[in-house]
């Protein structure tokens, strides 16, 4: 049941002089910059064929371990399932299809706070379109949102109304995708949030909204706390709602208190299972991101296993994510991580944000004064109860349980995700 409390950069000429990723630039942090730090430069992707050949060679030389000794996923991604993915990666997958798809979109790079930030920016043809900032997480990427660009920017074509239109801004977090890798400490969610506000203002917008899941939720929370001029509100798919008194017992694996409601008990048990059995990846990245990077940077199959395990677990798909995300799209995401060599840098973002992302107290959600909207997807790591959500976010004005979808809401269910954004942000237009 929905709960609501009522309350031109032109890209037509971008075919000219568009920078591409060359051999030198493909080494992260080596993208050329212009003389003006405020410049917004068109961007296209052209991975050297030598890198794609090297990837295929490495895949062909994969040394797999022996199979798991159980019949389920309790020891990790099953060998047979991974082998099937890796075989297709080496013998059927075509990275150039993704390049061609992305290079049709208006992509840019701009330097903010010393780093080149790569982003997609698509303006709607509709008047009064609302700018929306879409921030990805891990093991996702900006690719999570690609299939929502059309419905968000051209709603009439996709069954909506002209007044539903958004201008879409999709940046890559520093150290992810084609954004530059930080070479110093301090690029935490608060700093990224400030960079995002700078980006939106640099694009000429005086007002906007922010949406995020996973890291994107944490960054949107940070934006909400900072409340920069022009931020109308935030939308979250992975909110931080755990009450402070429940953090320790959840982490300890204690039984749910009898005082909790049925909905709260379900959330408590989901979180207890997650932290007790399924969060080892986070422990590695939070405490030893550099060592994690060594494990991921030399073997594409190891990198694929590390990412694919979570895609398998976190999609609403009965452990068969290809039911809701195509195999090619999954490999697009994995290949993006591999080609940009962002195993270590993406892990460092966890180290920078060494916190409990689900805890209201740790994320200081009660300090958020801007309007907050939450969409709960049924196969998210946990389904935030409305009671916890209202206590954690005093400015909550929209709470809705979506019919389908998991951790990768936009990637799995782009239509439902689009409908959620339309409904959530309608009162803020």
Image (tube, rainbow, N blue to C red):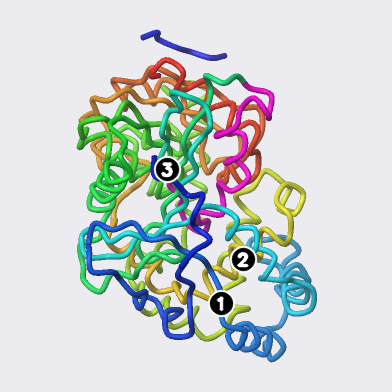
Q: What residue sits right under mark 2 in the picture?
A: 99
Q: Is residue 35 shown left or right of residue 67?
A: left
Against 159, residue 383 (above or below) is below
Nearer to us in this view, 401 or 72: 401
Please report the residue visible at 38 percent of the width from the left and 57 percent of the height from the top. 173
Residue bounds of the magenta highlight: 135-160
Against 218, residue 209 (above or below) is above
Tell me if I can see residue 248 in this picture.
Answer: no
Against 303, residue 221 (above or below) is above
Q: Looking at the rendering, which quadrant does residue 248 occupy?
A: top left
Q: Regarding mark 1 in the picture, which secondary structure is present there? A: loop
Q: Which residue ends up furthest to the top in the rendered image?
A: 6
Front tag of 1 and 3:
1
Task: State how far apart marks 1 and 2 are (Cα).
Answer: 8 Å
Which numbered circle lies on residue 254? 3
Q: What residue sits right under mark 1 in the picture?
A: 47
């Amino acid at each position: 049941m929905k709960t609501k409390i009522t309350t031109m950069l032109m890209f037509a000429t971008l075919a000219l002089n568009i920078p591409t990723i060359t051999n030198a630039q493909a080494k992260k942090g080596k993208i050329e910059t212009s003389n003006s730090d405020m410049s917004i430069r068109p961007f296209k992707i052209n991975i050297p064929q030598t890198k794609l050949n090297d990837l295929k060679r490495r895949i062909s030389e994969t040394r797999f371990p022996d199979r798991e000794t159980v019949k389920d996923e309790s020891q990790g991604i099953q060998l047979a399932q991974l082998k099937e993915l890796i075989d297709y990666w080496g013998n059927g997958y075509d990275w150039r299809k993704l390049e061609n798809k992305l290079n049709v979109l208006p992509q840019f790079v701009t330097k903010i706070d010393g780093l080149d930030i790569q982003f997609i920016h698509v303006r709607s043809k509709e008047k009064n379109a609302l700018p929306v900032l879409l921030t990805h997480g891990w093991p996702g990427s900006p690719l999570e949102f690609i299939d929502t660009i059309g419905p968000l920017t051209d709603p009439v074509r996709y069954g909506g109304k002209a007044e539903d239109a958004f201008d879409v801004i999709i940046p890559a977090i520093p150290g992810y995708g084609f954004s530059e890798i930080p070479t110093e400490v301090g690029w935490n969610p608060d700093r990224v949030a400030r960079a995002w506000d700078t980006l939106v203002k640099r694009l000429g917008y005086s007002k906007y909204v922010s949406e995020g899941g996973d890291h994107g939720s944490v960054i949107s929370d940070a934006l909400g706390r900072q409340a920069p001029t022009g931020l109308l509100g935030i939308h979250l798919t992975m909110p931080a709602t755990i009450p402070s008194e429940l953090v320790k017992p959840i982490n300890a694996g204690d039984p749910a208190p009898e005082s909790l409601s049925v909905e709260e008990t379900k959330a408590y048990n989901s979180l207890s299972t997650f932290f007790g059995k399924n969060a080892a990846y986070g422990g590695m990245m939070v405490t030893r991101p550099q060592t994690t990077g060594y494990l991921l940077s030399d073997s594409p199959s190891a990198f694929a296993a590390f990412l694919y395990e979570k895609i398998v677990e976190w999609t609403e798909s009965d452990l068969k994510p290809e039911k809701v995300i195509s195999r090619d799209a999954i490999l697009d995401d994995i290949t993006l991580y591999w080609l940009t060599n962002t195993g270590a840098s993406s892990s460092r973002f966890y180290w920078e944000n060494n916190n409990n992302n689900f805890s209201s107290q740790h994320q200081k959600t009660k300090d958020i004064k801007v309007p907050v909207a939450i969409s709960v997807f049924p196969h998210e790591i946990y389904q935030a109860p409305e009671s916890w959500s209202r206590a954690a976010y005093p400015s909550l004005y929209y709470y809705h349980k979506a019919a389908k979808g998991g951790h990768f809401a936009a990637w799995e269910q782009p239509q439902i995700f689009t409908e959620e954004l339309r409904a959530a942000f309608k009162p803020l237009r």
